[in-house]
Amino acid sequence: MMSTARTSPSAPSRRPQLLAAGAATVTVVLWASAFVSIRSAGEAYSPGALALGRLLAGVVTLGVICLVRREGLPPRPAWRGIAISGLLWFGFYMVVLNWGEQQVDAGTAALVVNVGPILIALLGARLLGDTLPPRLVAGMAVSFAGAVTVGLSMSGEGGSSLFGVVLCLLAAVAYAGGVVAQKPALGHASALQVTTFGCLVGAVLCLPFTGQLVHEAVDAPVSATLNMVYLGVFPTALAFTTWAYALARTTAGRMGATTYAVPALVVLMSWLALGEVPGLLTLAGGALCLAGVAVSRSRKRARAAAPDEMVGSRPENASRSA
């Protein structure tokens, strides 16, 4: 009877953690699937047009959801973070990343773009006061090595230009800045509001590519256009919302480290959807990515209390290590 009373206060605290973990899982799976769709859409659409089409599809989807849920405008204190994340992450990042990956091989892109989660952890510690636990740092180091291994193993014969490296580096910086700017906004507005209006800001930034989008849509195959719409509905509208939901419930650095699971999932999806059988080096890199994420998300286990310490212990202490 007494043991049930002790454990019951910790039970409600587990549900938000499980929901946040589920949201993060949805995000990384959908972001991994985006790489397969970008291959098809990127052959028919230029970087700016693809970004605009993807964002417009995302805005329409999110707008409908907001109307159904009767979500209003975000509170005024949230707008600064929404505007910055919309400009950097939804707008600038998507265009520059699409452009940069046309200029460099996969290995170079993996090396440069995956600096992003590291920058998120450093900026989060500097600007948001986030801590950098040793397990998080170690896990990110392992995952980064795995991401580079995957990229190098999947590289073709294409070369890398200095301009392409700069574009990928700008994408990584914009990604990190957008995430860190988004975190405070989530303290004032819902994940759906932050995502919807951030996506809208990014779409407005990409409006100069409207002419390209209209011109290329006329000649693009239906499969490429459908993939562009898919990118807007799922990896953008849904995945960015689940990302924001999870980010509101953990640190920016820990969420950034979670995205290192994406390269491993891309390998698996390319194998299943495109028939690209991964080599041993690619599989090893994917395993390193997942191992690093597991380390970065793990926490020290609380020391088991002695029987005499359990007597008279306060219930709220039981949920603190969860």
Image (spheres, rainbow, N blue to C red):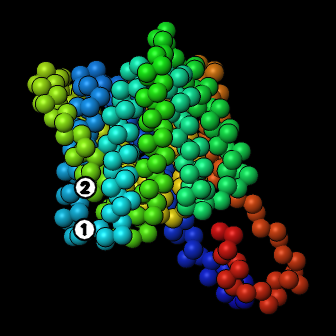
Residue at image mark 2: 62
Nearer to us of marks 2 and 1 is 1
- Inspect the image, locate mark 2, and give the three-letter code of the amino acid beneath it: Leu
**Residue positioned 67% across, 87% down in the render:** 5
Give me the residue at 46% from left, 11% from top: 158
Look at 23% across and 22% down and name the residue there: 44
Is residue 302 found left or right of 60 in the rendered image?
A: right
Tell me, yes or no, if residue 178 can be seen here: yes
Asked whether residue 263 appears in the rendered view, the answer is no
* Amino acid type, mark 1: Leu
Image spot of residue 135 (x, y percent): 72, 51
Residue 10's x, y, as percent? 62, 77
Task: For the residues labelled 2 and 1, say whether their Cβ atoms are less than 8 Å apart.
Answer: no
Residue 140 is situated, as x and y percent measured from the top left of the image, at 64, 43
Q: Is residue 60 above or below residue 49?
A: below
For disc 2, the neighbor class at 10 Å (few under 14, some 14 to 19, many from 20) is: many
Q: Quadrant of the C terminus?
A: bottom right
Crowding at label 1, few (<14), some or many (≥20) Cα neighbours within 10 Å?
some
Secondary structure at badge 1 equals loop
Mark 2 or 1, nearer chain start:
2
Q: Which residue is mark 1?
A: 73
Q: Which mark is residue 241?
A: none
Q: Secondary structure at mark 2?
A: helix
* Of 64 and 135, the residue lying toward us: 135
* Picture quadrant of residue 285: top right
